[in-house]
Amino acid sequence: MPRIIVDESVCKGCGLCANACPQKIISLDTGRLNPKGYHPARLMEPEKCVGCAACASMCPDTAITVEK
């Protein structure tokens, strides 16, 4: 089952990954802040992830890794 891993220490909460996700299953975790003070991205419904890597391709900080 594919999934994404977000390196929260690098994520700046720009939301580009959430916009790029065709499944619309990534969002910013507004309940938490990372060490830099940003809301990190979070995979909301991992069972729906198809491993397309659109999120990782769009991330300007390479904070997302896709595992298949």
Image (cartoon, helix red, strand yellow):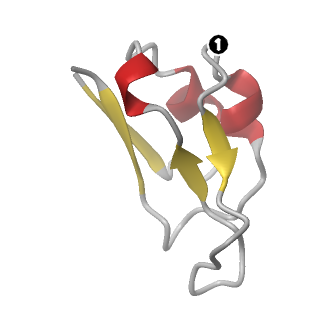
Q: Where residue 46 sits: x, y (%)? A: 39, 32
Amino acid found under the numbered disc labelled 1:
Pro
- Judging depth in this view, the residue of 42 and 53 nearest the camera is 42
Q: Is mark 1 on a helix, strand or loop?
A: loop
Q: Is residue 44 left or right of residue 50?
A: right
**Res 59 visible:** no
Residue under the point 38% across and 17% down: 51
- Residue 14 appears left or right of 45: right
Question: In percent of the image, x 69 and y 64: which residue is there?
Answer: 12
* Quadrant hosting residue 50: top left
Quadrant of res 55: top right
To which residue does mark 1 refer? Answer: 22
Quadrant where the N terminus is found in the figure:
top left
Location of residue 4 (image quadrant): top left
Q: Which residue is drawn at 45% across and 13% down?
A: 52
x, y percent for residue 56:
51, 33
Q: Quadrant of the C terminus?
A: top left
